[in-house]
């Protein structure tokens, strides 16, 4: 048999099975005197394609359309509900954190007064007990502050007050704050500062918060009677801060992850040291908002060196820069959701075009 166009083959097959007469056709004269010859011929190829598309669309079950509309409505309702829950959660964290800080400040104040002897003489045993209470109160206060900061980070409402800051004075004040905690493990904190280190226009309290966070971690994970060194120097257009310890170190494959929110290198082991994995994520957000960077270099068993940089030329819009930091990596999550929705839409459309049935 001679080669025939594909459309002719299709028409012959439909003629044989009787499907041809179910489609649109145009009347014509008889082709020959054969009794079996059809009294009609198929429409032109263009008409045939149009009729095929029409037939396909008409064959889509009405139920599929209703299911699609129901699916869209359900998603919209779920999105509205999630937004409401997210708003309630953010407000709860913010209000609760504020309310908890007030009684905590009072508790800490009275403990410090008793320790100083302002309310009478205390014994050595009482002093040790009160120091333990104060230390744990400080940890709780830090956690409350972290939760409050997280709610601010999430909503993009963290405030910054930039001011000219003498770097040496700022770091010395921070060491003085942390030395009491370091003394519990007989750890010495030292500072090395280059003479040509310039003043910086930064939010001093926020940067001190970062250094406190790094020192607190260094003390927690360092061995007793070890040394923690803070090195500050000018490099190019930046001031570089290094916090070196000789603790247990951090595995190579986890050094980037430790700046992610709620991440801990070893959850079981870290739990005894306190904290929930918020400090480094918050620190990263603060440093990025200042136009700097923060990272760690470490080797297990040999300690860690955390480095952070701050530009000598100040950032003009700290709060705007902060909103761009994306410490929660929401942009990556949004892209994943968009890709997932796009893939599902393509699958549904393919099924829809196929009459509600996926081949």
Image (cartoon, helix red, strand yellow):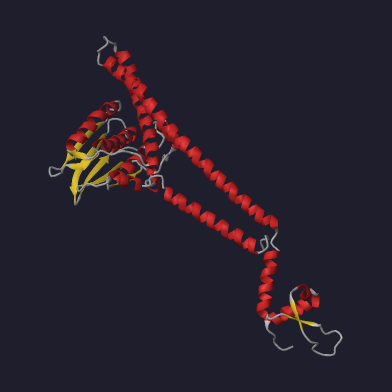
Q: Position of residue 210 (x, y in %)?
A: 29, 38
Between 242 and 22, the residue placed more toward the observer is 22
Between 161 and 245, the residue placed more toward the observer is 161
Relative vertical location of residue 259 with respect to residue 25 in this rendering, above or below = above
The answer to whether residue 302 shows anywhere in this view is no
Left or right: 348, with 165 as reference point: right
Q: Position of residue 3 (x, y in %)?
A: 69, 87
Location of the C terminus (image quadrant): bottom right
Between 303 and 148, the residue placed more toward the observer is 148
The answer to whether residue 160 shows anywhere in this view is yes
Q: Position of residue 86 (x, y in %)?
A: 48, 39
Relative vertical location of residue 223 with respect to residue 340 in this rendering, above or below = above
Left or right: 141, with 69 as reference point: left
Which residue does the image show at 74% across and 78% down from the upper left? 25
Left or right: 259, with 180 as reference point: right
The total of numbered circles placed on residues is 0
Which residue does the image show at 41% across and 30% down from the upper left? 95
Residue 172 sits in which quadrant?
top left
Between 339 and 29, the residue placed more toward the observer is 29
Q: Position of residue 300 (x, y in %)?
A: 36, 43
Residue 23 sits in which quadrant?
bottom right
């Amino acid at each position: 048999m001679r080669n025939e166009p594909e459309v002719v083959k299709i028409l012959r097959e439909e003629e044989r099975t009787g499907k041809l007469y179910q489609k649109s056709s145009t009347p014509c004269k008889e082709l020959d005197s054969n009794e079996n010859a059809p009294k009609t011929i198929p429409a032109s190829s263009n008409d045939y394609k149009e009729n095929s598309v029409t037939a396909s669309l008409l064959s889509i079950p009405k139920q599929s359309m209703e299911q699609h509309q129901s699916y869209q409505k359900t998603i919209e309702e779920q999105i509205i509900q999630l937004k409401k829950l997210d708003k309630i959660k953010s407000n709860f964290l913010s209000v609760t954190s504020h309310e908890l800080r007030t009684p905590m400040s009072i508790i800490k104040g009275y403990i410090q007064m008793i320790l100083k002897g302002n309310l009478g003489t205390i014994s050595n045993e009482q002093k040790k007990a009160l120091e333990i209470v104060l230390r744990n109160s400080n940890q709780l206060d830090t956690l409350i502050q972290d939760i409050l900061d997280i709610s601010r980070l999430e909503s993009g409402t963290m405030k910054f007050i930039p001011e000219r800051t003498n770097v040496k004075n700022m770091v010395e004040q921070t060491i003085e704050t942390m030395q009491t905690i370091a003394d519990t493990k007989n750890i010495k904190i030292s500072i090395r500062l280059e003479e040509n280190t310039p003043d910086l226009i930064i939010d001093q309290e926020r940067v001190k918060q970062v250094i406190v966070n790094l020192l607190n971690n260094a003390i927690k994970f360092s061995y007793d009677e070890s040394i923690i060194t803070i090195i500050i120097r000018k490099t190019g257009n930046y001031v570089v801060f290094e916090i070196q310890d000789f603790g247990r170190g951090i595995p190579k494959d986890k050094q980037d992850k430790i700046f992610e929110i709620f991440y801990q290198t070893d959850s079981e082991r870290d739990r005894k040291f306190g904290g929930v994995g918020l400090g480094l994520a918050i620190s990263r957000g603060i440093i990025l908002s200042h136009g700097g960077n923060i990272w760690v270099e470490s080797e297990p068993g040999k300690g860690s060196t955390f480095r952070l940089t701050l530009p000598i030329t100040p950032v003009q819009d700290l709060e705007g820069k902060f909103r761009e930091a994306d410490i929660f990596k929401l942009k990556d999550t949004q892209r994943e959701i968009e890709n997932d929705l796009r893939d599902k839409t393509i699958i549904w459309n393919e099924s829809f075009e196929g009459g509600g049935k996926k081949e």
